[in-house]
Amino acid sequence: MIVAIDGTAASGKSTMAHQVAEVSGFVFMDSGVMYRAAAFGFLKHDIESTERGAAAYLPTMNLEVNCIQSRTKVYVDEEDVSSRLHTSRITEMSSRIAMLRGVREFLLGVQHGIGDRFDEDPGVVAVGRDIGTVVFPDAEWKFFVTASPEVRARRRLAELSQTGIETSFQEVFDAIIERDRQDSQRVIAPLKKASDAIVINTDDLTPDEQAAIVLKYILER
C-alpha cells in the first residue's frame, strides 16, 4: 500500500507522515529531503541551477536514499547529510532546482524505485508536493494537508529556533507566501490537490490528531 500525503509548506504534513509511518509500520519517504539533498550536491560542487547544469551533474551524482520507518536518510558522496539540509542556502537552491525538468525526472526515478521495493511489504507513507498527482497517482490513499499562512509561519519559526537558526516571523511568513507562489505556478508538476485526495486542514489540530485522521482511513480499510 502507498499512502500519498501532499500539502503546502509547513502545513504539518511531514510530522503527520512520520507518525503514520511509526504506527502503521510502513517505511517513510520524504521527497522534500531528496530535493534538499540534490541541492546540497549542487552547492557542494558549484553546479549552476539550470537544465544544462543538471544534465552535466546528475548522471554522476552520488546520491543514496535510505527509507526506514519514520525517517528518510540521505547520503551525498557517501556522507550522511540528513541533518544539514535546512539552511537558507539549501532551501533557496532546492526551490530553484525543483523547477528543473532534469532534476524532477532524476528524483522521480529514485522515488519510483522506493515505491516498487516497499509497496507490498511493508507499505510506503510518501510525503511531498506532487506525490498523489505525479509520483504515485495510483496510490491507494491520497491526502492533501493545508493550514493558514500565519499558522504555518509560526510552526516553521519554531522549527528553525530549535535548530539554532535565528530569524523573524515576518521573514518566515514572507518566505512561506513566496514558496506557495512558486509551488503553485511552476510549469512542471505544480502543487495541486489530487482530485481524489482527502483534504485535512491542520490549523486547530495537534500532530496526534492529524495522524489519527489518516490512520483511521488506512487501517480500517
Image (tube, rainbow, N blue to C red):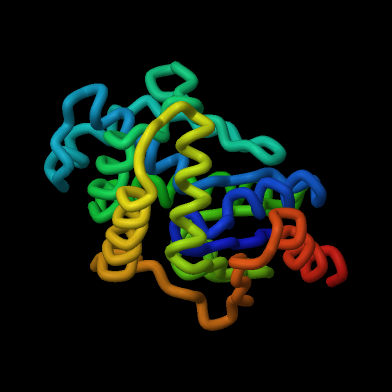
Residue at the spot 34% in from the left edge and 64% down from the top edge: 180
Q: Is 219 displayed left or right of 211 in the figure?
A: right
Residue at the spot 44% in from the left edge and 54% down from the top edge: 153
Q: Is 192 displayed left or right of 45 in the figure?
A: right
**On the image, which quarter does residue 213 sit in?**
bottom right
Q: Nearer the viewer, residue 171 or 212?
A: 171
The quarter of the image holding the N terminus is bottom right
Residue at the spot 46% in from the left edge and 40% down from the top edge: 33
Image location of residue 172, percent across then percent down: 36, 49
Q: Nearer the viewer, residue 144 or 53?
A: 144
Image location of residue 52, percent across then percent down: 12, 43
Q: Residue reaching furthest right?
A: 220
Residue at the spot 76% in from the left edge and 61% down from the top edge: 209
Q: Is residue 60 above or below residue 109?
A: above
Image location of residue 101, percent across then percent down: 25, 55
Count of all numbered marks drawn on residues in the image: 0
Q: Nearer the viewer, residue 47 or 210?
A: 210
Q: Nearer the viewer, residue 195 or 158?
A: 158
